[in-house]
Amino acid sequence: MSHYDLESAINRAVEILAKSRNAVALTGAGISAESGVPTFRGRNGLWSRYKPEDLATPEAFSRNPRLVWEWYKWRMEIVYRAQPNPAHLALRELEDIGVLKCIITQNVGGLDKKAGSKCVVELHGTLWLAKCTNCNYKVEMATPPSTIPPRCPICGSLMRPDVVWFGEPIPPEVLAIAINYSRECDIMLVVGTSGVVIPAGLLPSIAKSCGAKIVEVNIEESAITSMADVFVKSPAGRVLPIIVERVKRTLSR
Ligand code: BJW
Ligand code: ZN
């Protein structure tokens, strides 16, 4: 993408966002990359070093809960130290100025909330809750657990991370909220996701079929790019602050 193409994509994104009071963001691991949190796919992604089926499935957990917890504890330590980056802060600002209704995130680290965003739907759950595999009791964890695998304070059974693994359904009430936001938004801002994991990857088509424009920010083309009305090929932390600044300037005129 030449400098000219990028500039023109940014301006088209600004133009339509400035008219919106009902935009929704769909975010993925790429938005946290500039905070130092590894993505899943791609050359340095987690799946280049670990096999998803060994770590992110219910079968993997029953086979080896300690191994799965070690991996999650390591990831918790990374996000625990990480700070929201300019992309998270830009989305928070977009909410503050009344353009962005909500963030639907596939991320489990909670950096959007740490950035101050109020409406965040965590489609794939959160690292900061553990749930009992027997009685479903949930425990909040403010820090990575010191002893793993943790045990349920109620019934003594194994606790697991409260995230959605492959082959598991997204909690129906959470998915319903995400689908509603997708149906009702006028712009879906898709940031830093490969778009290959379903059902999350289907939300842009739902939004589009209900009349929304799709604005995508990614450093590479994704499974969503072919349906995007505007594709901004740039790191989210670099370009989102520019977009939001220009939206603010447009609105104050
Ligand atoms: C930047 C950037 C920068 C970088 N700026 N951009 C065949 C076998 C088994 C299952 C299936 C199958 N076919 C289909 C399925 C279903 C499966 C699925 O989708 N699989 C596909 C992978 C093929 N889906 C499921 O299993 C889901 N459940 C389900 O379908 O249930 C049905 C059911 C109903 C009723 C009863 C029972 C079942 C659940 C999926 C859960 C996904 N979970 C994970 C891990 C758990 C949470 C965790 O530990 O974190 O969620 S997988 C992983 O992928 C994680 C992510 O949230 C998710 C999405 O990844 P994301 O965010 O898009 O990251 P990347 O790395 O893929 O992309 C990063 C992007 O950023 C790239 O595009 C970069 O270019 C970009 N980028 N730097 C901007 N600076
Ligand atoms: Zn229990």
Image (tube, rainbow, N blue to C red):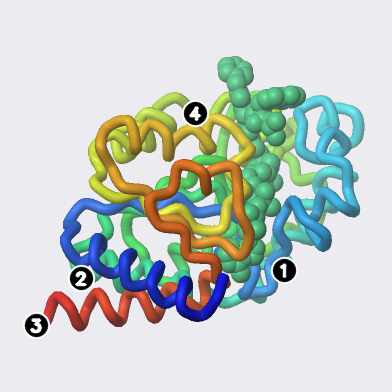
Q: Quadrant of residue 95?
A: bottom left
Q: Residues within 10 Å of mark 3 (few under 14, many from 20)?
A: few
Q: Earlier in the sequence, mark 2 or mark 4?
A: 2
**Which quadrant holds the C terminus?**
bottom left
Q: Is residue 111 above or below residue 125?
A: below
| Residue type, numbered disc 2 | Ile
Q: Nearer the viewer, residue 114 or 224?
A: 224
| Residue type, numbered disc 1 | Ile
- Per the image, the residue denoted by label 4 is 171
Q: Residues within 10 Å of mark 1 (few under 14, many from 20)?
A: some
**Which quadrant holds the N terminus?**
bottom right
Q: Nearer the viewer, residue 215 or 98?
A: 215
The Cα–Cα distance between marks 1 and 3, rounded to whole angstroms, is 42 Å
- Per the image, the residue denoted by label 2 is 97
Residue 253's disc number:
3
Residue 101's disc number:
none
State yes or no: Cβ of the residue under disc 1 lies below 8 Å from any atom of ligand 1.
no
Q: Is residue 10 visible?
A: yes
Q: Earlier in the sequence, mark 2 or mark 1?
A: 1
The Cα–Cα distance between marks 2 and 1, rounded to whole angstroms, is 31 Å
The Cα–Cα distance between marks 4 and 3, rounded to whole angstroms, is 43 Å
Q: In this image, 59 relative to 92: left or right? A: right
Residue 148 location (% of width, % of height): 82, 50
Label 2: state its secondary structure.
Answer: loop
Label 3: state its secondary structure.
Answer: loop
The Cα–Cα distance between marks 3 and 2, rounded to whole angstroms, is 14 Å
Q: Quadrant of residue 31?
A: bottom right
- Per the image, the residue denoted by label 1 is 78
Q: Earlier in the sequence, mark 4 or mark 3?
A: 4
Residue 28 location (% of width, % of height): 56, 53
Q: Is residue 198 above or below residue 124?
A: above
Q: Residue at x 32, y 72 (%)?
A: 11
